[in-house]
Image: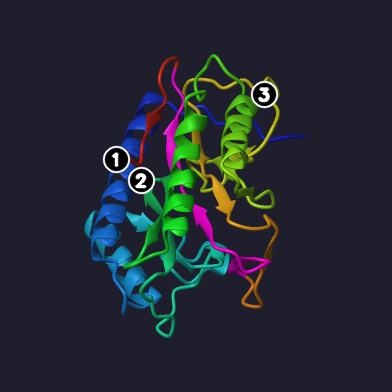
């Protein structure tokens, strides 16, 4: 039997708005400071400090045994990169930073991909595509559509631009748990899936590759990389479904 999708109350939504604001601000704070020569552990440290200073907790810290407040993934790494003092960010790198914030019992989740320094133009175009795919999808994230409408729109947009759609990792509901129903793949069939309802809170997160879309997990048990070594991008926000335009809680 499938778990029901959680519909948030007004008070719960307000907590998630506050959590989302902190998450938006920590991404802005980290993004403004990101530069070559930093380690991925440096990014993790400023993330932890910022979230704590704002009266919240990092959702990822200790989740399933993860040791960081932020997932920091470089170049062919797509997801779940473990912060390390020995991984140094270089000019031309693409850096994926995924952060969650827990405030008063509710989580929000958001990710960004950054181009560091003099990054290849093809990489910046890929990063832009992942972001645009998100906004294409949420055009349909309201109570008049089904989940498959959102998923299919994202996948079709990505593939129309010549990129690979990662299928083994997907978005998800978010709220009292970091990962809640429903599953939100970045591909699908329009008109299929659950009917969206006002009060649903969804972590929608296009994940794309410049080459083959197949990924694998490294020996550390966490870091997800492209199998063919190609560059990749990740863009995510927590979205509130309404009867009208969706509300992005982490922007």
Question: Disc number at residue 104?
Answer: 2
Q: Residue at x 41, y 58 (%)?
A: 121
Report, in whole angstroms, how far the alpha carbon at label 3 lies from the one at label 1: 33 Å
Q: Position of residue 83 (x, y in %)?
A: 44, 74
Q: Residue at x 24, y 58 (%)?
A: 29
Q: Reading the chain from its start, which is encountered first: label 3 or label 2?
A: 2
| Colour treatment of the image | rainbow
Question: Disc number at residue 190?
Answer: 3
Q: Does 33 appear above or below 86?
A: above
Q: Residue furthest right?
A: 1
Looking at the picture, tell me which residue is in the foreground, 231 or 96.
Answer: 231
Q: Position of residue 202 (x, y in %)?
A: 51, 36
* 241 inside magenta stretch: yes
Q: Are marks 3 and 1 in contact (CB under 8 Å)?
A: no
Residue where numbered disc 1 is placed: 18
Q: Does 125 appear above or below 71?
A: above
- 222 left or right of 85 in image: right
Looking at the picture, tell me which residue is in the foreground, 235 or 52.
Answer: 235
Q: Position of residue 52 (x, y in %)?
A: 27, 61
């Amino acid at each position: 039997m499938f778990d029901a999708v959680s519909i948030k109350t007004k008070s719960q939504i307000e907590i998630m708005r506050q959590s989302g604001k902190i998450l938006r601000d920590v991404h802005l704070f980290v993004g403004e400071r990101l530069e070559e020569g930093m380690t991925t552990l440096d990014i993790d440290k400023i993330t932890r400090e910022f979230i704590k200073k704002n009266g919240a907790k990092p959702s990822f810290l200790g989740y399933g045994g993860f040791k960081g407040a932020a997932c920091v993934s470089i170049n062919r790494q797509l997801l779940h990169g473990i912060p390390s003092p020995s991984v140094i960010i270089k000019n031309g790198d693409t850096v994926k930073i995924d952060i969650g914030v827990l405030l008063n019992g509710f989580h929000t989740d958001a990710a960004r991909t950054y181009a560091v320094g003099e990054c290849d133009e093809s990489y910046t175009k890929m990063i832009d595509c992942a972001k645009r795919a998100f906004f294409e999808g949420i055009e349909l994230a309201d109570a008049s559509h089904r989940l498959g409408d959102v998923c299919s729109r994202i996948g079709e947009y990505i593939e129309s631009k010549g990129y690979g759609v990662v299928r083994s990792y997907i978005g998800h509901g978010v709220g009292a748990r970091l990962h809640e129903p429903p599953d939100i793949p970045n591909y699908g069939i329009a008109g299929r899936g659950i009917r969206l309802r006002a009060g649903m809170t969804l972590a929608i997160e296009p994940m794309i590759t410049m080459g083959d879309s197949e990924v694998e997990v490294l020996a550390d048990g966490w870091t997800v990389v492209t199998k063919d070594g190609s560059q990749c991008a990740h863009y995510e926000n927590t979205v509130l479904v309404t009867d009208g335009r969706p509300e992005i809680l982490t922007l």
